Every structure is written in C-alpha cells, then in structure tokens.
Amino acid sequence: MKDFVFHNSTKLIFGKDKEQLVGQESVAYGKKLLLHYGGGSIKESGLYDRVVQSLHEQDIEVFELGGVKPNPRVSLVREGVSLCKEHNIDFILAVGGGSVIDSAKAIAAGAKYDGDVWDFFTGKSTVKDCLPIGVVLTIPAAGSESSDGTVITNEDGLYKRATGHITMRPKFAILNPVLTYTLPSYQTACGITDMMAHILERYFTNEKNVELTDRLCEAALKTIINNAHTVLEDPTNYDARAEIMWSGTIAHNDLLGTGRIGDWASHDIEHEISGIYDIAHGAGLAIVFPAWMKYVYKHDINRFAQFANRVWDVEIDLNNLEKTALAGIQKTEQFFSSIGMPVTLKEANIGEEHFEEMAKKGTERGPLGNFVKLYEDDLIQIFHLAK
Ligand code: NZQ
Ligand code: ZN
C-alpha cells in the first residue's frame, strides 16, 4: 500500500427534505450568493423555489446564472466569472448535477484570477484559490459534489479538459435521494455507469497489498449493481435511490483510491469523445470501459479474474484464468447494455471519422493511464475495439 493523505473536507448532509438547510449552510460564507443551475429541471421540480426561499430566510442576496449544459462550456463559465467580479460575490451555490457543479467550480477559480479561466485547463496557470462553493445535488453520477476537480469544454477546438485544486472541494453538499425521483431513466443509467467507472478506474491498479480498498471497491460496485434495476423500474423507491446516491459520492470522494494509483485512461478517452460528440459522459464510459478492458486485461489476468469472481460471481477457473477474466468483462458490458447504455460507438451513432484526431488530442500531453500506459496508436486500437 502506498503512503497517502486522505482529507475530504466536504460536509455531507444526506436525507429527505435536507435542501431546507441550504440557507443556513450557505450564510456562513457570506451574504452575496451566485445561484448556478442547469437547463430547467430544478424549476420544473419545484426545487428552485424551495432553495430560493431558504436563502431569503437568511437575508442572502441572490444573483442567478442558469443555463449550464451537460458537458459545461467555458463561455458560460466566463460569464459567471464576470458576474462574481462585478457583484463581489461571496459564495457560489450549485444546484444540479456534475455539469452545474463543475461550472460553479470553474467560476469559483476564475473569480480569484486576473487572467482567462481557460488557462487553468491548458496548464498555463494553476488554481491557487477559489470562492467557496456549496451544492444541492440532483443526480448521483459525477461525484463532483465532494471531488476537488472540474471538467469543462471549450467550444473553440472542442477540447474537454479537467483541472483541480483542494480549494475547489465544495464546503457542503446536500444529498436528498427524493430529488433524484424525477430523473429520466437514461440519465439515471448514465449516472450509474459513471459511478461504476470511478470505482473501476481505481480498482485497476498495479499496486499490490491493497486488500481493504479492493474490497471496498467491490462492495460499492455490488451495491450499485444490486440497486440499479430497482431504481430504473421503480424510480420512487427511496431505499434504492438512497443506496445509489450514497454510492455515487463514495465512488469519487477519494476513499476508495487511498494507498493505490488509479488508471483514468478510460475517463480521458471518454472526454475526447464527449468533447467532440457532446454525448453524456456516462454513455461514453459504457462504450470505452469494456473496450479498454479487452485491450489491457492481459496485463494482469489475476486482477481481472478477481474482479469477475468477486463482483460478478463468475466461478474462478484455475486452469483457465483468462476465461474467468473475459467472462467478467462480458458481464460488465452486458450490465451496461441492460440498463440502456450504448456499449459500442455505433449504438451512439459515432463513426470512425475522428478516431485519429481523438487519439492525437488525447495524448498530446503524454500517454494516458497508469495500469497500462497508452499512446496514440493504442487509443486508435481501443476505438476500433469499441466500434
Ligand atoms: O440541466 P437540467 O435541466 O438540470 O437537466 C439535467 C441534465 O440535462 C438533468 N437532471 C439533473 N438532475 C435532474 C435532471 N433531470 C430531472 N431531474 C433531476 N433531478 O440531467 C442531465 C445531466 O446532468 P449533468 O449535470 O450533465 O450530469 P452529470 O452529473 O452526469 O455530470 C456530467 C458532467 O460531469 C463531468 C462529466 O465529464 C460531465 O461533463 N465529470 C465531473 C467530474 C468531477 N468534477 O469530479 C468527474 C466525472 O468523471 C465527470 O468527468
Ligand atoms: Zn466520470
């Protein structure tokens, strides 16, 4: 096990009606607040009204910026940065999913910086400070509610890039599973895929002697798998929604990655796909992950066989571990398909036209992944496996 520091400072407030506490939690950070949200789901559900009321009860002055799109764009981030600077905003409240939270994080960093916020995503500058942010989460998926990273798309060149800093971690996140009842099944499934991918990225490591985190990963994966079909068939099942929501945060709050080095190539490859084709991140991962697994499993057949056995209950064939490993990959792919995800590029209407461009852009800052290092040619082969 590697040495590590685990410090996740986000206060998590979980349960029914907990969004009523948002005013109380926010006021600790000042009286001028930017309320950031997406395309309208929070207005349709009535959440917007409840949040605004709770903020007004604390005499908080509310500025608003809605319209965050899935795969959030830097143009809206720039607008948010100007708003924050113009009105001396103290605090940003993100009400929504990963896209809204990531947009809020980027605004929070840009508000404390004199240059262009995109500099943080190209490596021209690094984040040193951020405005504090808080979250009311409406979709369990990205784990951004307690992560220290953000992923933003630049319309100019269709680059989807990530950056992060410890000060980006939300001060609090309110998680009420009831707020996820209104999610369309496709978004629910995208979220499930993304959280599983966050665990898988950490699971496939070269680090030996990481039994506790292996087993925590396996338990979280099994919990998600056990509850996935329930939330899709019975969207107002509180218990199943709660399991999925808590799993989404645990999947990406860094606990499962302690003492080990995760891979993350599949995420980087997916970002190239959603950067160009604007598909949901979870759907992109359902396509990339099985292809990545097929490409790299020989690097550590034992680990893939362990995954097949412990997560998918595939019986270990000691005489043919490769068979066990491949069965686990097949089960993963079948599961994504069973919850309505595309598992090939074709199913997402994506052809071969940008394979070379995506492989080039994806590796222009060096090879991807840690479990196995992947170069431009490897990415092209993975795209072919995902066809
Ligand atoms: O915009 P609205 O109208 O709110 O609709 C959203 C959006 O269309 C809808 N939605 C959300 N909650 C809802 C709801 N509809 C009905 N009822 C609700 N309760 O769902 C759609 C998708 O929302 P989005 O925020 O895009 O989803 P998600 O949470 O999956 O976020 C995806 C983004 O997060 C990034 C991804 O790359 C992608 O851009 N990621 C961020 C990470 C991080 N910061 O740590 C890590 C992840 O790996 C990921 O890369
Ligand atoms: Zn993800």
Image (tube, rainbow, N blue to C red):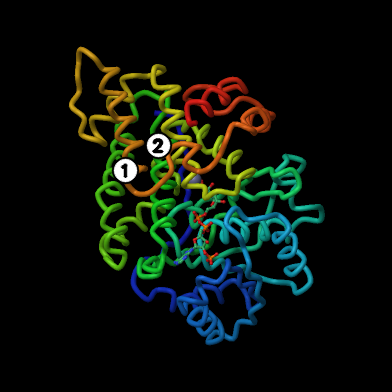
Please name the residue that numbered disc 1 is placed on. 221
- Vertical relation: 170 (above or below) 329: below
Q: On screen, 119 above or below 89?
A: above
Q: CA distance from mark 1 to mark 2?
A: 9 Å
In which quadrant of the rendered view does residue 218 lie?
top left
Residue at 32% x, 38% y is 334
Q: Nearer the viewer, residue 224 or 203?
A: 224
Relative placement, left or right, of 245 versus 348 is left
Residue denoted by label 2? 200
- The image shows residue 63 at horizontal and vertical percentages of 67, 77
Measured as percent of width and height from the top left, residue 227 is found at 27, 53
In depth, the one of 227 and 89 nearer the eye is 227
Give the number of callouts. 2
Mark 1 vs mark 2: which is more N-terminal? 2
Give, as a three-letter code, the residue at label 2. Answer: Leu
Q: Specify the quadrant that holds the N terminus.
A: top left
What amino acid type should be assigned to the residue bearing mark 1?
Leu
Q: Are marks 1 and 2 in contact (CB under 8 Å)?
A: yes
Classify mark 2: helix, strand or loop: helix
Q: Position of residue 61 (x, y in %)?
A: 64, 82
Q: Residue at horizontal 18%, vertical 27%?
A: 315
Please tell me how crowded label 1 is: few (under 14), some (14-19), or many (20+) other residues with Cα within 10 Å: many
